[in-house]
Image: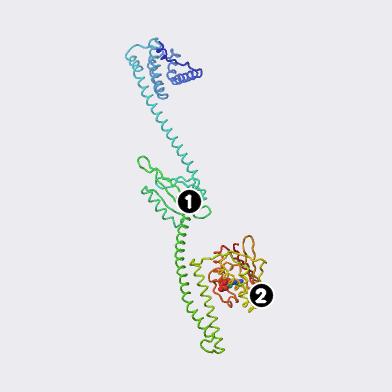
Amino acid sequence: MAGSKSRETKVAPLSRAAKRGLLQSSKRFFLSIVIGQWPVIFVIGFSLLAPQFIGIYSESYRLIILALLVAVVYAAYSSGLRQGLVSAVLAVLFNTYILSNEVVTVSINDDAVRSILLLVVVLPGVASVIGYLKERNDFFLAKEKQARTQAEKSEQRLRFMAEAMPQKIFTANPSGKIDYLNQQWLEYSGLTFKELKSNNFTIMLHRDDNSEVERRWWHSMETGEPFQVESRLKRADGKFHWHLTRAEALRSNQGKIIMWVGSSTDIEDVRRTRRLEANTKQLIEERRQLKVLNKAKDEFISLASHQLRTPATGVKQYIGMLLEGYAGKISKQQRSMLRHAFDSNEREITIINDLLRVAQLDAGKVHLHVAKTNMTSLIQDVLDEQKSAFKARQQTITFAAGKTSIMAPIDAARMRMVLENLIDNAGKYTPDGKKIEVGLAKKAGRVLVTVADEGIGIEPEDKEKIFEKFARLESPLSVAAEGSGLGLYWTKQIIDLHGGSISVDSKPGEGSTFTLSLPA
Ligand code: ADP
């Protein structure tokens, strides 16, 4: 039938290599069995080779039985259950041979029966028990060895991992004594393992942290609770770095502490960042408070200036009327005194106006009205206005303007005040009879205005300072020249609002050049 044919299983013929393998393993198996039988084979061989010698003695049969017994027990003990049993079978077969071929003289009496029983029943039993015990013992020994090797391997792996880590790793025994430190400890501290181990790290600890670390460590050792502390540890170069050290207890299945495993991480950068954050927070708060104070101060100056200006304007008006003779004739002396009063009042009004202008600027109330303006004529105007003041000081003032006028997008009214201030300063801080040069040029899309004098000059360290509020440098000319110290501050702010910049180049005792750079 086709169906039954198809169900036939074909056994694949063994390959040559498989056959050879099978042959070899069976050879090994028989060889091991034969080798394990050497005690019994020895007894049998001896009995067969020296029958005359054995036959002489009436007790020889018992001796052979005893020797076989010992041989079987030894085979079972040394090679295990299978060998013991094979030895027992050999011994029984040999006994049968002896009895049937009368190799030794044996009368079938009780002794012989007992011996036969001993060999047939007891021997395989004894061999089984001994062999079984031996195999069990071997089995447990092998298991223990395997476990030990495994433990050694995993410990090796753990140590390897610990060495590869960037952190400092340590282990301690259950009583808290350090018994392992990875290489990172030695590199960080520059100390030897022995030095570190001998005093449980205290050699590295900052004096101020010592007692806290000790207290927490021994508390953890007593309670088994995790250990954690932040402390300073000394580096090889003597510097202390903050570290976060943690340790946990490793417990057996029964909950007993086997060891402590811990690590220390350098948190110097983290602490520094934390400190910086705290400082920044404090600074921000201080800045906020300062801003509030500054605003209050600006408001006060603005209010006070307003309040002062009204009476000062009143004084100006009435002194003016007196000078013009509205209240009758005044003597020469009275006129001179009134003139002094008028001039002083004028200076006061200038200061009040400066204060008001700055207060307005600080309050963000200054908005430029920018329009394309002829800078050449603006400068010329200012120079014409101040001509008499320069003449009074016998100073020469020149204006180097090109042939064509230069235009710039500016707030003309405020730029006029800027120029007045710079040109006025040049005159004020320059000795009588010297020269002042004003320049105007267009360069690389910028309009450049320069005011150069042959005055007292400015020390390098004061170059930034003069643009600050109320900055007045000490010099005999500064004392003589009156001012509020607000002019350049205001000037700079206005130039900044124009998207320009102001700078000064100066040699003390030789003169200064102020340069305005404005977008064209
Ligand atoms: P002030 O009203 O005092 O002139 P400014 O703000 O205009 O105030 O100037 C600040 C200070 O800068 C002056 O007090 C003076 O010491 C210094 N300074 C200004 N311009 C010059 C200059 N051309 N040469 C030397 N020092 C000057």
Label 2, label 1: how far apart the Cα atoms are: 71 Å
Looking at the image, which is closer to me, 380 or 7? 380
* Foreground residue among 469 and 18: 469
Q: Identify which residue is drawn at 41% across, 44% down.
A: 259
Nearer to us of marks 2 and 1 is 2
> Is any atom of residue 375 visible in this view?
yes
Tag 1, which secondary structure?
strand
Which residue is drawn at the image coordinates 36% and 42% (left, top)?
256
How dense is the environment of label 1, judged by Cα within 10 Å: few (below 14), some, or many (20 and up)? some
Frontmost residue, 164 versus 202: 164
Mark 2 Cα shell of 10 Å, populated few (<14), some (14-19), many (≥20)? some
Q: Is residue 118 above or below residue 247?
A: above
* Quadrant of the snapshot with the C terminus: bottom right
Percent coordinates x, y for residue 473 in the rendering:
57, 72
The coloring applied to the image is rainbow
Question: Callout 2, which amino acid?
Answer: Thr
The tag on residue 396 is 2
Q: Amino acid at mark 1?
A: Asp
* Above or below for 7 versus 248: above
N-terminal-most mark, 2 or 1: 1
Instruction: Find ligand 1 in the image and state its quadrant.
Output: bottom right
Q: Nearer the viewer, residue 343 or 168?
A: 343
The vertical placement of 400 against 8, above or below, is below
Circle on res. 451: none
**Are the two marked residues, 2 and 1, in contact with CB atoms closer than 8 angstroms?**
no
Could you tell me which residue is drawn at 52 percent across and 73 percent down?
354
Query: Mark 1 sits on what residue?
Result: 266
Q: Secondary structure at mark 2?
A: strand
